[in-house]
Image (cartoon, helix red, strand yellow):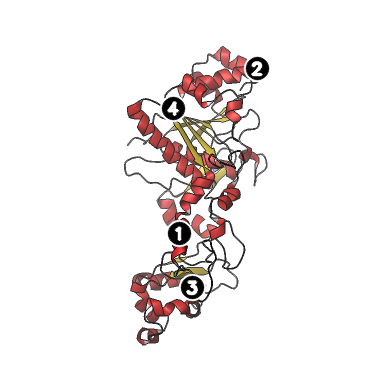
Amino acid sequence: MSKALEGVKILDMTHVQSGPTCTQLLAWFGADVIKVERPGVGDATRGQLQDIPNVDSLYFTMLNSNKRSLTLNTKSDEGKAIFTKLIEHCDVMVENFAPGALDRMGFTWERIQEINPRMIYASVKGFGPGPYEDCKVYENVAQCTGGAASTTGEIDSVPLVTGAQIGDSGTGLHLALGIVTALFHRSHSGKGQRVTCAMQDGVLNLCRVKLRDQQRLEHGPLTEYPQYPNGTFGEATPRAGNASGGGQPGWIVKCKGWETDPDAYIYVITQAAAFDGLAKAIGHEDWLEDPDWNTPKARLPRLEEMFDEIEKWTKTKTKFEVMDILNPLNVPCGPILSMKELAEEPSLRETGTIVEVDHPERGKYLTVGNPVKLSDSPADVDRSPLLGEHTDEILKEIGLSVAEIESSKSAGAV
């Protein structure tokens, strides 16, 4: 079985999270990812949030599996010459610098096309063309400017960002799709092209249903939001607490142990088709004969009372017991799984979604493996590289002699 992207060479000029997420995915699928880092310093995340002194942080190791590290000072003349050779040698260049950084180094898109017309040049930016295109963007800025924060949070309370890295990792996923699409196009056109993903655009794509709701608002209230029928709607898609947003009422309710365990909760959706079983399970068979309760429309004004009654029952059981009872009744529900529970979940280890990796300086650590599974192309997860670990090896591959490598080192280019 061969790896899906074997033979594809990626020049990885990315740092922190959005770009490295993208190149790590490509590396898992077998691409040869050459991570270019500043000599002596490397990717800033190597030193951020360190839990063990003087060892690459988990922030770095978990975003840079399966890559090779080359140190290069692209500001020096020798460094620029090596960089030019790397562009000739590779299929794809990925960067997430501040806008215009590569242009100022003398490597505009036009120049890159001259060096290698087959090169695909992929960039993460904060914003697309428009009033904010020169602004720097971080995760939470992207969540706020892409519509996620305004539509997340408790009703009548402040906007909230989510713990999911939809700005950084979400944009990295979008960019990876753009790159493989451009590679496919190149296979019959013979030419590379530019691939750009703006973080604002990526977040907005993930908030698509909220843009749907914005347009529905013009035609009356959003009946599946908790604001209906007793509350009011403003001009914009509102925050909706933990409502399911899919037309079926859902909420998070407490389970046994909630007083001491911050994650002893379960999400329950009161889907119409499975309502009879749910009502019987929680001891409310009386609802099934009662016209105030036995249709979805009748229940709408009583959702708060309904979830209070469901919660009285769930508080007598653990979240896993609730899951075991409701699942056979086809009631959609999901326990709130903590990071500790996910880290210890055997099924996620078996599928390679969570992987234990050995690192020469850190020892064993857990990382998230490839979430995309291909039936015939394995995606093994290897450790992240030490800073500059593959410099000599890569320079030989692009045609430098031993003497040239030595002189590059003494000039401080690598």
Q: What residue sits right under mark 3 in the picture?
A: 228
* Cβ atoms under marks 1 and 3 closer than 8 Å: no
Please tell me which of labels 1 and 3 falls first in the chain: 1
* Disc number placed over residue 215 in the picture, else none: 1
Q: Amino acid at mark 1?
A: Gln
Q: What residue sits right under mark 2 in the picture?
A: 410
Please tell me which of labels 4 and 1 falls first in the chain: 4
Where disc 4 sits, the SS reads loop
Vertical side of 338 occupied by 266: above or below: below
Q: Residues within 10 Å of mark 3 (few under 14, many from 20)?
A: some
Residue 18, quarter of picture? top right
Q: In front: mark 4 or mark 3?
A: 3
Where disc 1 sits, the SS reads helix
Vertical side of 90 occupied by 78: above or below: above
Work out which residue is located at the far right of the displayed protein and give it: 53
Q: In front: mark 3 or mark 2?
A: 3
Point 37% across, 46% down: residue: 373
Q: Amino acid at mark 3?
A: Tyr
Q: CA distance from mark 4 to mark 3?
A: 53 Å
Point 57% across, 50% down: residue: 145
Please tell me which of labels 2 and 1 falls first in the chain: 1
Vertical side of 75 occupied by 207: above or below: below
Q: What residue sits right under mark 4 in the picture?
A: 91
